[in-house]
Amino acid sequence: MFFRIVGNLVILGALVVLAYVGVILTAPAPGPESPSPSGLEVGLARSPSAIDPGAPETAVDESLAEPPPEEPAEAIPDYAPIEPITWVRLPRLGIDAEVVQSKFVQLNDGGTWLIPAFKVGHAEFTGGAGRAGNAVLLGHVTSRSLGNVFETLERARVGDLIQVSGTSGDFAYRVVDVRRVSRTDVSVLEPTATAAVSLITCTGRWLPQLQDYAERVVVRGELVQAT
């Protein structure tokens, strides 16, 4: 299962505008012949943490070569540390799952967030536990080989409790919005000024020609308490 999206938070804020709008978070349809893609592709011009590699190496007489000019300090972004989410619970839905990092990797002219099997993935470069920003959590809906950690997510209701654990403690969120969006809708990934969490999985009609579901279910929670 994978989801083409753009990242968020401060690091990805500017890139969201430039991102390719194609979004896809797939889970294989039930059955023994179902494919098992496991990436989360993002149509970005470059990775949010990429640094220009420079020119290819050539044979140079180092005794004649001038030392390269020093790189200005401001040329390398100073990324704020993001507190990883380690566990998520939605008691009414029976969701109680470990969360691990969904790492962002370069893919062609964009990139991909890899979703773990049988666990929830915390999308790299998105908001941290209990912190301002939109923490994006991704999970498979139904797959024999990858799990169904978010199988009941679509039953969420406004007011439901979302419990999130991080390295510094536990945080309580309340669901403020449950919606279905098109597989190409990236608006749900935009940064937020307040502490929020977005749980995302597949839903809707299975599209065999695309090996993808037509829609996504997105459950948005806002921070109400740190414990």
Image: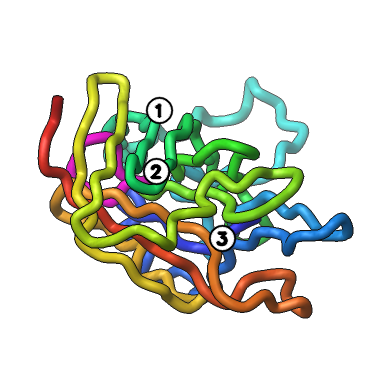
Amino acid at the residue labelled 1: Thr
Residue 15 can be seen in this image: no
Find numbered disc 3 in the image and state the secondary structure of the residue it sits on: loop
Residue that carries the numbered disc 1 in the rendered image: 86
- Marks 3 and 2 close (CB-CB < 8 Å): no
Relative to the observer, which residue lies in front, 58 or 31? Answer: 31
Find numbered disc 2 in the image and state the secondary structure of the residue it sits on: loop
Mark toward the viewer: 3 or 2: 3
Using a 10 Å C-alpha cutoff, classify the residue at mark 1 as few (fewer than 14 neighbours), some (14 to 19) or many (20 or more): some
Q: Residue 75: x, y in percent?
A: 34, 42
Q: Farthest residue in the right direction? A: 33
Residue that carries the numbered disc 3 in the rendered image: 3
Q: Choose top left, top right, bottom left or bottom right for residue 84.
A: top left
Q: Residue 162: x, y in percent?
A: 28, 43
Find numbered disc 1 in the image and state the secondary structure of the residue it sits on: strand
Q: Residue drawn 53% across and 30% down? A: 66
Drawn side of residue 196 relative to residue 104, left or right: left
Mark toward the viewer: 1 or 3: 1
